[in-house]
Image: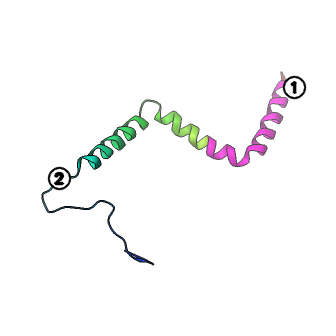
Amino acid sequence: MNSPVGPLSPIVQVGAVGTAVPHLYDQALQRHLLQCAKARGRWFGVALFAERARGLVLPRLATTAALSAVTLGLFAHWL
C-alpha cells in the first residue's frame, strides 16, 4: 500500500530467511499476550457489561440523571 508521501516501510526490519525475531520484539509480544490473557480473566463479562453501560450512559448523562431522579421519586412516593 502506498501513502501520499511514498511507500510504507515495515516497522520491524526482517532479516534473512531463517533468522530469529529479535529478543526485544519477543518480549514485547510476550507482555502483550499476558496482558490480553489477564484482560479476559474471571470478571471479563462484568467488565464488558460495565463498559457497554458506560457507553450508553455517559453521552446522555443529564438525561440519565433526570430519569433516575424521577424514577427514584416515583418509587419513593409509591412506598
The residue at which mark 2 appears reads as: 20
**Looking at the picture, how far across and down is residue 31, in whole percent?**
34, 41
User: Which amino acid, mark 1?
Assistant: His
**Front position among marks 1 and 2:** 2
Residue 13 versus residue 28 in the image, above or below? below
Say which mark, if any, is on residue 46. Answer: none
Residue 68 in magenta stretch: yes
Corner quadrant of residue 51:
top right
Q: Secondary structure at mark 1?
A: helix
Give, as a single range, the part of the protein colored magenta.
Answer: 54-77
User: Which amino acid, mark 2?
Assistant: Ala
Q: Does label 1 or label 2 sit earlier along the sequence?
A: 2
**Looking at the picture, how far across and down is residue 43, in whole percent?**
47, 31
Q: CA distance from mark 1 to mark 2?
A: 71 Å
Q: Residue at x 65, y 46 (%)?
A: 56
Which residue is at the far top? Answer: 79
- The colour scheme applied to this rendered structure is rainbow
- Direction from residue 53 to residue 10 in the image, left or right: left
The residue at which mark 1 appears reads as: 77
- Direction from residue 60 to residue 11 in the image, left or right: left
Near-viewer residue (2 or 22): 22
**Looking at the picture, how far across and down is residue 48, in whole percent?**
52, 39
Q: Residue at x 26, y 62 (%)?
A: 13
Dot 1 alpha-carbon crowd within 10 angstroms: few under 14, some 14 to 19, many 20 or more? few
Q: Residue at x 40, y 35 (%)?
A: 38
